[in-house]
Image (cartoon, rainbow, N blue to C red):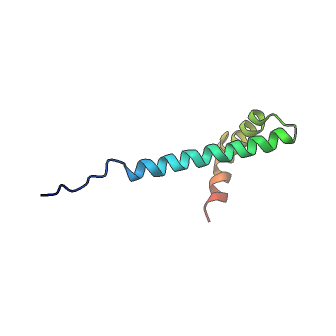
Amino acid sequence: MSHPQTDTGSPAGGVVMTNILSLAAGLGVISFIFMIAGVNPLFAISEIFQGSFGSVYGFKETVTKAIP
């Protein structure tokens, strides 16, 4: 009698890990571009996030632009 194989990996976990790695890769690439341009990457990225999510107005505008 053969035993059915069980999948021990979670497909949702793979999706989450892919999203995290994609975000990290994107931040890495943009940080490299900022460094080439002579800009402090941490300062630039923090300013981008602060402008997008640092106020109610910024958050509303970000959501408005993100939703088609």
Residue 16 screen position, x and y as percent: 48, 48
Looking at the image, residue 9 lies above or below residue 47: below
Q: How many marks?
A: 0
The residue most toward the left is 1
Residue 14 screen position, x and y as percent: 45, 50
Residue 15 screen position, x and y as percent: 47, 52
As drawn, is 35 to the left or to the right of 6?
right
Q: Which residue shows up at 75% across the image and 40% down it?
A: 31
The residue most toward the front is 1
Residue 51 screen position, x and y as percent: 72, 42
Q: Which residue shows up at 40% across the image and 53% down it?
A: 11
Q: Which residue shows up at 77% across the image and 41% down it?
A: 32
As drawn, is 4 to the left or to the right of 14?
left
Quadrant the C terminus occupies:
bottom right
Residue in the foreground of this view, choosing between 20 and 64: 20
Looking at the image, residue 22 lies above or below residue 43: below
Q: Which residue shows up at 16% across the image and 57% down it?
A: 2
The residue most toward the right is 38
Residue in the foreground of this view, choosing between 26 and 63: 26
Looking at the image, residue 68 lies above or below residue 43: below
Residue in the foreground of this view, choosing between 55 and 22: 22
Quadrant the N terminus occupies:
bottom left
Residue in the foreground of this view, choosing between 50 and 12: 12
